Image (cartoon, grey):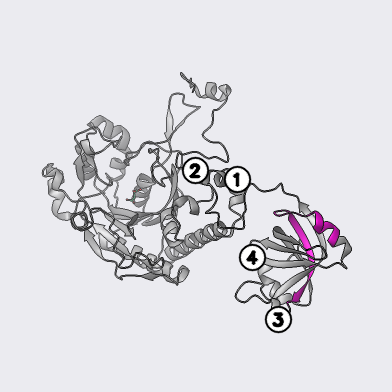
């Protein structure tokens, strides 16, 4: 359809015949006249079939909402009294001369012209392809793209390289349970899906890449809770030869720049972002993601805050971390270093409960939207942490040998951060949960209602993998 025009551009074709293509948004049959709103990815326009266009009139009588049409028509200025100010194409109307039906549609299970908040979420997720047609979802998904593009361009200018790391990887301790994938070639062996690219990004620092980023998918097999998803997206980055301040500075600058460019109506409450220690946050706010907004009713107010000085370790009885076996577990990231003043304590294994980590979390309006730290880059430090959280020496060699060996080949000091990308977009779009900003999310119970996943697999597939199901539900 080379001659096809986008609906947003119709205004520049007044008096001319054009071709558009799209979906029937609304149809109003007034007998002699039939009105239709047509929709494409760029917007909506009102169309009308007049009685003198007999063939078009015949087709339009049959047409229903969500049918896909190619329409030929003349762009007319609307009479003064019918002009709608402030909306796209409010001053024009397309006089239809011909209609070609490209595809029919069954009566949709729900209305896609509303914002969808009145519709049950299960049915929206079952017919997600339809649900994504609604203007709110189109906006969310397109704005998500703009955000990713802005981040890429910004980091590119700062000499970062976007690098993909494997999805089929190895089980790593990051606080959650791994999703595992059976190997067919090596029966009884498993890959793990990444909980984050943590180890790979540190190994890229060993590789001399110096500045890495990735818009990375992370998979964590956690109990379903709130708006968690089994898979979610991080903006993950890592930098060599940096200290905590350097990582915080570039992230703060990036966040300020993207709000200014993409959300100019929003106001950041305080710049530079305030900082609070974990201890003070707990004392003053009762949690470690303080909501510091001075007006919680303002949907356009953004209050960023850095939370620092977290304890490195905590006693395991407070944690259900599947990756630790000892008395102690890590609170944030086992690959971090303590703050400088507490490094000796770590190496001498004393005052464990008082050691503070170099971790910095970034929060927005009471949500944690990211976290990172300065990392261990010396084998001794990482080994100490792993021992403290209960890994035996032979397990450390087996599971982390590659890290320890990389750290002995000339790995520079480094640190990084990862943002919860879905959550950031959710907050910027004033959405109540991350499912509203993910094209194909799972339900709160971890199900994909559209694809009907998880699902069983054939006996042949199981046999190839050497897997036997002992108890079928
Ligand atoms: N890998 C960490 C996480 O996913 C983030 C980081 O420290 O960069 O929580």
Q: Position of residue 317 (x, y in %)?
A: 21, 35
Query: Alpha carbon of mark 1 to alpha carbon of mark 4: how far?
Result: 22 Å
Instruction: Residue at 70%, 72% (x, y): give it.
Output: 10
Q: Mark 2 falls on what kind of element?
A: loop
Is 65 or 74 nearer to us in this picture?
A: 65
Q: Which mark is residue 442?
A: 2
| Residue position for label 3 | 80
Q: Position of residue 456 (x, y in %)?
A: 54, 28
CB at mark 2 closer than 8 A to ligand 1? no
Q: Is residue 208 magenta?
A: no
Q: Position of residue 13 (x, y in %)?
A: 74, 75
Q: Which residues are magenta?
A: 57-78
Instruction: Residue at 53%, 36% (x, y): give it.
Output: 453
Is 402 or 175 nearer to us in this picture?
A: 175
Query: Alpha carbon of mark 2 to alpha carbon of mark 3: how far?
Result: 48 Å
Is residue 169 visible to us here? Answer: yes
156 over 457 or under it: above or below = below
């Amino acid at each position: 359809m080379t001659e096809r025009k986008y609906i947003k551009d119709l205004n520049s074709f007044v008096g001319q015949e054009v071709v558009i293509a799209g979906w029937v948004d609304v149809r109003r049959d007034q007998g002699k006249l039939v009105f239709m709103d047509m929709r494409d990815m760029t917007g909506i326009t009102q169309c009308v079939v007049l009685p003198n266009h007999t063939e078009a009139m015949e087709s339009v009588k049959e047409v229903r909402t969500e049918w896909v049409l190619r329409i030929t028509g003349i762009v007319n200025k609307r009479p003064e009294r019918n002009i709608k100010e402030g909306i796209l194409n409010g001053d024009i109307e397309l006089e239809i001369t011909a209609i070609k039906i490209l595809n029919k549609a069954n009566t949709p299970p729900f209305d896609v012209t509303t914002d969808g908040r009145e519709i049950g979420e299960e049915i929206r997720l079952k017919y997600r392809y339809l649900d994504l047609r609604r203007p709110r979802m189109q906006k969310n998904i397109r704005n998500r793209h703009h955000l990713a593009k802005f981040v890429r361009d910004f980091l590119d200018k700062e000499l970062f390289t976007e690098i993909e790391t494997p999805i089929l990887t190895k089980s790593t301790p990051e606080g959650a349970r791994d999703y595992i994938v059976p190997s067919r070639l090596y029966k009884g062996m498993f890959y793990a899906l990444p909980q984050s690219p943590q180890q790979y990004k540190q190994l890229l620092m060993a590789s001399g890449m110096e500045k890495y980023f990735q818009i990375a998918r992370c998979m964590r097999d956690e109990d379903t809770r709130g708006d968690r998803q089994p898979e979610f997206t991080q903006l993950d980055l890592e930098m060599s030869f940096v200290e905590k301040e350097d990582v915080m500075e570039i992230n703060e600058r990036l966040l300020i720049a993207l709000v200014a460019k993409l959300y100019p109506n929003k106001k950041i409450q305080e710049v530079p972002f305030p900082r609070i220690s974990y201890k003070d946050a707990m004392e003053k706010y009762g949690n470690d993601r303080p909501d510091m907004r001075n007006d919680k009713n303002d949907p356009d107010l953004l209050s960023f805050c850095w939370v620092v000085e977290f304890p490195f370790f905590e006693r395991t009885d407070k944690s259900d971390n599947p990756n630790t076996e000892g008395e102690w577990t890590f609170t944030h990231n086992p690959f971090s270093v303590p703050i400088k003043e507490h490094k000796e304590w770590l190496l001498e294994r004393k005052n464990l409960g008082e050691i503070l980590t170099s971790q910095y979390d970034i929060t927005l309006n009471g949500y944690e939207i990211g976290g990172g730290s300065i990392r261990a880059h010396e084998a001794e430090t990482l080994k100490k942490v792993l021992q403290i959280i209960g890994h035996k020496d032979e397990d450390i060699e087996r599971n982390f040998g590659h890290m320890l060996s990389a750290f002995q080949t000339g790995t520079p000091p480094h640190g990084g951060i990862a943002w919860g990308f879905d959550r950031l977009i959710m907050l910027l779009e004033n959405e109540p949960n991350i499912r509203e900003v993910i094209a194909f999310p799972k339900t709160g119970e971890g199900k994909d209602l559209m694809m009907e996943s998880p699902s069983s697999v054939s006996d042949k597939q199981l046999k190839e993998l050497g897997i036997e199901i002992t108890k079928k539900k």
